[in-house]
Image: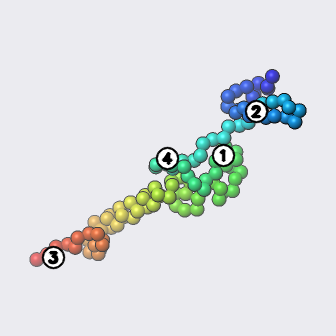
Amino acid sequence: MPAPRQRSRSRRRVYKRTPGGRTVIHYEKKIPNWPKCGACGRRLNGVMRGRNVEMKNAPKSRKKVNRPYGGVLCPECARKLIKDKVRYMYWERKREQPWLPPLPSEEPPEPRE
């Protein structure tokens, strides 16, 4: 009979064969799912998969990737977000300072008379 603390389904059951030929059950903590991107939900590469205690004791390089929004967004979503922020900042600045040069994709302004 297992100990009462191991009867709950919060632990997963692993069946092991002993050298004597018996099958016994070992109770292990469940492993959480992989971390996912906050925007698109894809799995994050370079981020470890572990319980809170393991994450707390792991080195920083295993917890997140060394770039802006590392460990939160996948590279594609981070790139899109940074581009959108830069574009927004440019247009905000251009609204305040209309003499800024136009973007390459922008039509040149019509001459004033």
Q: Position of residue 15 (x, y in %)?
A: 76, 33
Looking at the image, can residue 97 be seen?
no
Q: Which sits earlier in the primary sequence, circle 3 or circle 2?
A: 2
Task: Name the element at disc 4.
Answer: loop
Q: Position of residue 24 (x, y in %)?
A: 80, 30
What residue does disc 3 label?
Answer: 111
Which one is in front, 100 or 96? 100
Q: Position of residue 103 (x, y in %)?
A: 30, 71
Task: Name the element at disc 1.
Answer: loop
Res. 15 mark: 2
Separation of residues labelled 4 and 1 (CA atoms): 18 Å
Task: Name the element at disc 2.
Answer: strand
**Callout 4–callout 3 Cβ contact below 8 Å:** no
- For image coordinates 74% across by 34% down, the residue present is 14
Of all residues shown, which one is farthest toward the front? 21
What residue does disc 1 label?
Answer: 50
Separation of residues labelled 3 and 2 (CA atoms): 80 Å
Relative to 109, 87 lies left or right: right
Mark 3 or mark 2, whichever is nearer to me: 2
